[in-house]
Amino acid sequence: MNHTSGNTKVPPFPPEYRASGLLLHVTSLPSPYGIGDVGPSAFSWVNLLHEAGQRWWQSLPLGPTGYGNSPYQPMSSFAGNALLISPESLISDGLLAEEDCESHFPSDFVDYDAVIPFKARLLQVAWKHFKSGSCTDLRPEFDEFRNKHEHWLDDYALFRAFKLKYDGAYYLDWPEEVVQRRPDALAAARGELQDEIEQVCFAQFLLFRQGDQLKTYAHSRGVALIGDLPFFVSPDSSDVWANPELFVLDDHRRARFVAGVPPDYFSSQGQLWGNPVYNWDAHRATGYRWAIDRIRALLAHVDAIRLDHFRGFAAAWQVPAGAPTAQAGQWVQGPGATFFEAASRELGGLPFIVEDLGIITPDVRSLRDQFQLPGTRVLQFAFDGHAYNPYLPHNFVSNTVVYTGTHDNAPTREWYEELPDHQRQNFWSYLKRAPGVNPDVAPALMDLAWCSKAALAIAPLQDVLNLGPESRMNVPGRAAGNWRWRYREDMLSPSTVQWLRNLTETSKRPSASAAAREGSLGNDVSREVRTLDRAS
């Protein structure tokens, strides 16, 4: 895989590369069906990005969510979230009628308790119509999809069918013969649950098909896509159930150790995340096949990947299962360079952005720099008053992605309102500006990001809109109420789009078409799109 396109490339970025983009999860898009999806509103969003001169759209993980609706606890590293299937597209395909989709949902947040059964009912109707002979032209495509993805799809579909049969219970609470994957029990279940299994497969087919159409359209508009890959997997997932040898489990398939982070200034007891930890010896023996396959699966939908919790590739904090706090844990070495060497051989390159936040030690920085992986800088962390703070723009290297904030941060307006007075003063002193009576902090922070030397500047849409606490996507450590925010179409005015375009042009972060015209960052848009396609 050759990532170059004229003088541009997907990560790692060359010194002359300058571009920008926005962070918005698919679920946050407008839609009449209660949750954003990959249908018409996603195409409209791509158009807005193009009009605003943006070259990248970053989303959160796209896997099927379970407890808490967190995209960082997916039930599979390979499957997609069926809630993202567009009803409008199913109507166009003839699998649904408009009257099937009548609904009344709030427009500014996702009501998962209502959306989940609504989308499940629509998919049941679509499956019924498909089985009865509607859209017969889709049958060859569906069969081809099942054959192509059987290495993960068969286990995932059976896992979801068992979930339905056992009322959503944690898989370790299923019958022992199912937990242990005894062949006779699985064979019997495949016969008993055949229709449920096929419906799960069909939903994945529909989602992948719609996702392919969206990716093709984004490329036609000069917009590339950044996906997000969680480092750990959910304990209640088809990943663990189908591949127990790849995790540190006991004879009953329960985790012997769980992931977390150690005590620090912010948490005297550390954090227990509860994810099972990897058996890296087993991964190494297979050439990291499963781990590379999950990257390849995501690259089918996106052009570059944000690697969450990158420091885990160097060393991860492991806590004995059952420990009341994370204080009893220890650092355990990760796969290190051998993983990235194997991934580079298999994928033809490393189109990664690494989330190198938190406790970053020299071995983590060395691993990042050995493979020229662009690191992450978050401006909200920059203003503690120390000139050597790595999040201050004058300390950046060009092969960096700078964010005003991430999905875990408060929107910048809320962040500023909660800052201590001395950090507010540090902020305005660094900008060499007076705050004024009602300062526009989010635009000021975006201007700082866009004008920095970082190759890529990204802001959440909440900061473009200068929104407050009502728009926060996630509060780490809060169990409920996250991942619900949505934007309304009337929020993003033509004047705001023009402001963003002007900021992008004045900070010399040209759109794909402008870069092609200038000849400095690429010869033409189509070549860049072809390169991005090769990257995936």
Image (cartoon, rainbow, N blue to C red):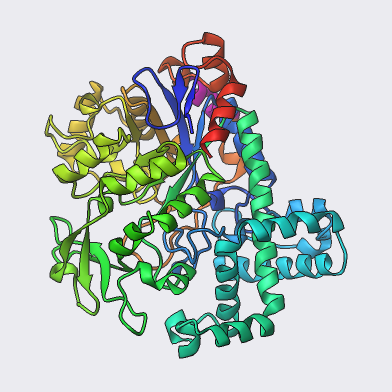
Q: Residue at x 56, y 40 (%)?
A: 491
Q: Is residue 333 magenta?
A: no
Report the span colored magenta.
494-502
Residue 479 to residue 468: above or below: below
Identify the main secondary structure in magenta: helix
Q: Nearer the viewer, residue 411 or 200?
A: 200
Q: Residue at x 36, y 22 (%)?
A: 14
Location of residue 433 in the rendering, given as x and y in whole percent from the top left corner: 25, 22
Quarter of image, res 79 = bottom right
Location of residue 167 in the rendering, given as x and y in whole percent from the top left corner: 56, 83
| Number of numbered labels in the structure image | 0
Q: Is residue 439 visible?
A: no
Q: Nearer the viewer, residue 395 or 286?
A: 286
Q: Residue at x 25, y 24 (%)?
A: 431
Residue 398 to residue 377: above or below: above
Location of residue 422 in the rendering, given as x and y in whole percent from the top left corner: 15, 38
In the visual, does 512 lie left or right of 508?
Answer: right
Location of residue 37 in the rendering, given as x and y in whole percent from the top left corner: 62, 52
Q: Is residue 45 visible?
A: yes
Q: Nearer the viewer, residue 277 or 234?
A: 277
In the visual, does 488 lie left or right of 446?
Answer: right
Q: Nearer the viewer, residue 488 or 535?
A: 535
Residue 78 to residue 154: above or below: above
In the visual, does 289 lie left or right of 128?
Answer: left
- What residue occupies the far top of the structure in this picture? 518
